[in-house]
Amino acid sequence: MRIGLTQRVLFHRDRAYDSLEHSWYEFLQGHTLVSIPNRLCSPFPDIDLLIITGGDDHPVRNHVEHELVNSMLSRDLPIIGICHGCQLLTTKLGGNAVPVDDHMDCYHEVFYQGEPHLVNSYHKLRIELPPPGATVLARDPDGHAEAWIHERTAGIMWHPERMQQPWIPQEIQLLLTR
């Protein structure tokens, strides 16, 4: 499967660079990975699935990611948002994300089908309202959505690519095998 990965914008000596965390290569081994630049290119890359990776917001990145989401949705191709990507998809599809104080640089449990799973957390926003029609798959101990799916679009608030034993809900894992 050809998987497109969006990238962070990092600055060094007043220059912008696109950046992709190395852990993605191991997490998605066996797939062909396509790093998507933070610039609009035409036509969009020929990919089977888009992963909007984590990282900070940046206006150029957000613009490119919104255009990529529009393109993928119009072609009925799957999208998975991780952390920043989950927040972007949640709001783009009509949900809501709000500030949270206790989810940065920590681990916490999420509950999937009644079973606890320990996940990492690097976010400053939480999902207050998932997108309309989305099925919430995992919740934090306070009951807030941490993973959701709607048709072939899904969001995960933690970083499975950074976990020693990566875990994502089965319904989202299926998107990586089609």
Image (cartoon, helix red, strand yellow):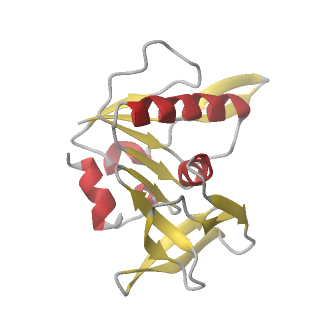
Q: Image check: 54 left or right of 78?
A: right
Q: Position of residue 65 (x, y in %)?
A: 56, 34
Q: Say if 107 sits above or below 35 in the image.
A: below
Q: Say if 50 sits above or below 93 in the image.
A: above
Q: Position of residue 108 (x, y in %)?
A: 54, 79
Q: Position of residue 42 (x, y in %)?
A: 47, 12
Q: Say if 69 sits above or below 129 in the image.
A: above
In the orientation shown, which residue stands out farthest toward the right? 14
Residue 75, image quadrant: top left
Task: Say which residue appears at 57% left-offset and 54% top-offset.
Answer: 90
Residue 47, image quadrant: top left
Q: Say if 176 sits above or below 46 in the image.
A: below
Image quadrant occupied by the C terminus: top left
Q: Position of residue 11 (x, y in %)?
A: 72, 30
Q: Nearer the viewer, residue 136 or 16?
A: 136
Task: Say which residue appears at 60% left-offset and 48% top-offset.
Answer: 88
Q: Nearer the viewer, residue 175 or 152?
A: 152
Q: Nearer the viewer, residue 141 or 13?
A: 141
Q: Image check: 33 left or right of 52?
A: left
Image quadrant occupied by the N terminus: top left
In the orientation shown, which residue stands out farthest toward the top? 42
Residue 121 in sight in this render: yes
